[in-house]
Image: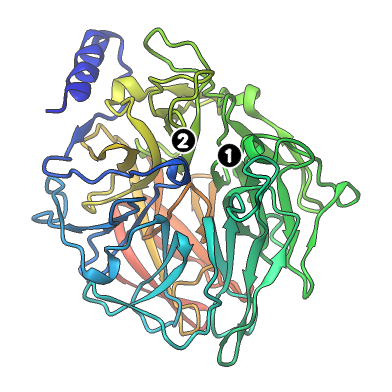
Amino acid sequence: MRPERLALLLIACAGAAAAQPDVPVFADRSTGITHAYTGGWEHFVGGGVAAFDCDGDAMPELYAAGGSSPATLLRNRTAARGAALQFEPETPQSLALTGVTGAWPLDIDSDGHTDLAVLRVGANVLLRGDGACGFAPFDDLHLADEARWSTAFSATWEQGAALPTLAIGNYVDRDDPKGPFEACDSNRLYRPTPTGYAAPQVLEPGYCALSILFTDWGRHGRADLRISNDRHYYVRGGEEQLWAMEDDPRLFTRADGWESYVIWGMGIASRDLDGDGLAEVYLTSMGDQKLQSLVGASAPAYRDATYDRGTTAHRPYFGDDGRPSTGWHVAFGDVQNDGRDDIFVAKGNVDQMPGNAMEDPNNLLLQQPDGSFAEQGLTAGIGTVARARGAALADLNLDGRLDLTVVNRRAPMEIWENTGPAPGHWLQLRLTQPAPNPDAIGAFIEVEADGTRYTRELTVGGGHGGGSLLPEHFGLGDTQQVRFRVIWPDGVPSDWAEIGTDRLLRVTRDGTALALAPY
């Protein structure tokens, strides 16, 4: 066992008497995994991980950015569903790329096999998957080969398009002789043509993007592009951004209801926490992390709910380092299956920044019955203090409980199995529809359980440096029977379907009906 893990275990055991009975315990399954995110200042940021099934057995693989080290594919060798997690490095040459900052899975060509968008310091790469964990560059999409410092990615399918629209966020312009401060690069929007991709639309001004997300924030039938920016390098004059995805994209302004918001933006996550059908947004930063709640659907007007719900996570919660935290990847997920989504935040100093905490444990914020959040990272066993970057909160052994993997800077990545307790029921749904966009990116799932409605938008992007393409997980508490429907990306709602819980299902579009099968 790694020394830092042993120390964490001893601290957790000392406080076990005060532990909440339903706080899950995560077991370390990182034995034999040595991969780390390395490199100089160009790899202070990035370091994400993609979680997806690349061989069709439903068990998720992990593809981790390496920075100056080669990126690594970890094959899922778990013996059976519900067995102890086991991963082994097995990286084909096409994936052993250097300079990788992050990767996002999606089915670009709609052939039923998951592909990868790989961002780099240098030329980005789109890789076609073959369904057997083999990958090769797309040679027919005509994506402009720009050697920039790319750090953020999102994708959506605009109506009628055969290929996804891709957005790439770029950090500092390395060619600016006056940089790096006040030298933020512009961002790029790639829209499809009948033969591939047109020359990119330049989205400017750019303010050093570190996370971007296409989201239909007001459920108007169009995904707009939210960008979280790092004020460390834009210094002044910058802010968070929301682009209206019109034929000629434009920035939302105060006249539209959008208020200026200035943070050290690192990651984005979106999830409906209060059952009103509209997603809250969590933004990681240096110092306070931010939780925003939409004020109605008519305008992109958000109010700060951070202090109301106890989600600041602004300083280490154990140890004697009282300096501000540095947040990176953020993910929502119900780790107890109690029907309330929780929040994981990966933490870690940029490198040696003296004004911020050096021993900065990852957060596990468990949602309480009153809607507030309580820190339980130490009790759960995942509050390690390596310099974390990217992460994935996902069911890696298909037992109905969300597990965790974390990529660290200059330290081995971590894989944690959720061993419970998870006293509640659950449901996992993987959507499919006819091409294009077979994974139904942009769809909404609505699940009704004992008077509570859970709403989930399927997106590609957000987080920090990576994302997941896996079944959507719903924790449901005591509920044993639910009904659900899908609002498909074209806006057409399905019929409602009634099913029992504790099931992992493939949901296929069949007119307005839903065809259900085990996944």
Using the rendered image of the protein, determine whether residue 267 is visible from the camera's viewpoint.
Answer: yes
Q: Position of residue 236 (x, y in %)?
A: 76, 36
Among all residues in the image, which is located at the extreme right?
Answer: 255
Q: Under tag 2, what secondary structure?
A: strand
Q: Secondary structure at mark 1?
A: strand
Determine if residue 444 is in view: no
In the displayed structure, 337 sits above or below 144; it is above
Distance from Cα at disc 1 to Cα at disc 2: 9 Å
Residue in view at x 60 percent, y 44 percent: 275
Quadrant where the N terminus sits is top left
- Residue 318, image x and y in percent? 38, 13
Residue sitting at the far bottom: 194
* Colour mapping used in the image: rainbow
Q: Nearer the viewer, residue 9 or 332?
A: 9
Q: Counting other residues with Cα less than 10 Å from the Cα at mark 2, is it few (<14), some (14-19), or many (20 or more)?
A: many
Identify the residue position indicated by label 1 in the image.
Answer: 282
Is residue 278 found left or right of 392 in the rendered image? right
Say which residue label 2 marks: 343
**On-image quarter of the C terminus:** bottom left
- List x then y, in percent, for residue 406: 32, 41
The reply to whether callout 1 and callout 2 are in contact (CB within 8 Å) is yes
Quarter of the figure with residue 55 = bottom left
Determine the residue positioned at 40% across, 7% down: 320
